[in-house]
Image: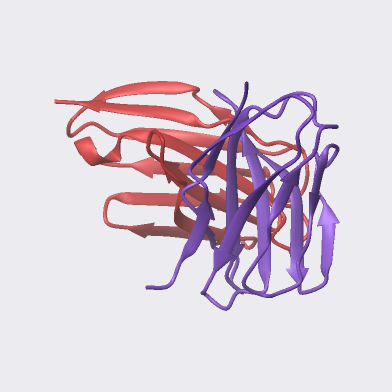
Chain colours: A purple, B red
Amino acid sequence: DGGITQSPKYLFRKEGQNVTLSCEQNLNHDAMYWYRQDPGQGLRLIYYSQIVNDFQKGDIAEGYSVSREKKESFPLTVTSAQKNPTAFYLCASITPSGAAFFGQGTRLTVV
Amino acid sequence: QQPVQSPQAVILREGEDAVINCSSSKALYSVHWYRQKHGEAPVFLMILLKGGEQKGHDKISASFNEKKQQSSLYLTASQLSYSGTYFCGTDTTGANNLFFGTGTRLTVIP
């Protein structure tokens, strides 16, 4: 089945620790995006990549890093520089016509 | 660049209609609508491109007024399955970099 797979579903991070969220797609889409969602808020863009080996910062990129070494994969690292990382993280890939297909999300909690 | 959605929340009885509005301060290339159920990923509903088009499927339709930089989502004869949070996403450049509103929580009760 084609789709977007995010893992893990739940993640706990200790203070000062880096963690990496996985996002894999088999839809053959060029464009992939990472969003952060806080309670009662919309989705805010962290990073996006329109093509392999290229990515751009979104509105709230500070404290995050990404890589795009393969078309299928767009992992997000939440670094210790991100002071308030507790949130729901959503990865999406975009069809050429612009429709976004989202993964099931990763809920990150700082402990 | 975040669009403004209204209302923030609405409660409907089954069979009633609702309108959700999305307004931008910038000129829009396209408007996207998504529905998210609690704890799940947003699901794509439709895209409207500049040119003032309307779209719809089943009993959910939308319009896009390019001049007013606004879009509205219409839900008619609501069903229990329509419950969820509806987000509009706006694209100001044509590059599909979407800015999402804060959402409208729709609850349909029997």
**What x and y, as percent, mark residue B42?**
47, 46
Depth check: give the residue in front, B55 or A25.
Answer: A25
Asked whether A13 or B10 is in front, the reply is A13
Where is the C terminus of chain A found, in terms of image quarters?
top right
- Residue at (61%, 46%) from the top-left corner? B89
Furthest toward the bottom, the residue is A28
Residue B45 is situated, as x and y percent measured from the top left of the image, at 43, 54
Residue visible at 59% across and 53% down in the picture? A91
Residue furthest to the left in view is B110
Q: From the viewer's perspective, tell me whether residue A107 is left or right of residue A72.
A: left
Of the 4 image quadrants, the one containing the N terminus of chain A is: bottom left
Residue, x 72% and y 45% (percent of image)? A45
Q: Describe residue B26's horizontal placement relative to residue A9 as left or right.
A: right
Name which residue lies at 50% across and 51% down: B63
Q: Does residue B100 appear in the picture of this structure?
A: no
Rendering quarter of residue A39? top right
Q: Residue B22: where, in percent of width, then height? A: 58, 37
The image quadrant that residue B36 belongs to is top left
Residue A2 lies, with reference to residue B12, above or below; the image says below
Left or right relative to B110: residue A32: right
Q: Is residue A77 visible from the viewing direction of this image?
A: yes
- Given residues A40 and B110, the one toward you in this image is A40
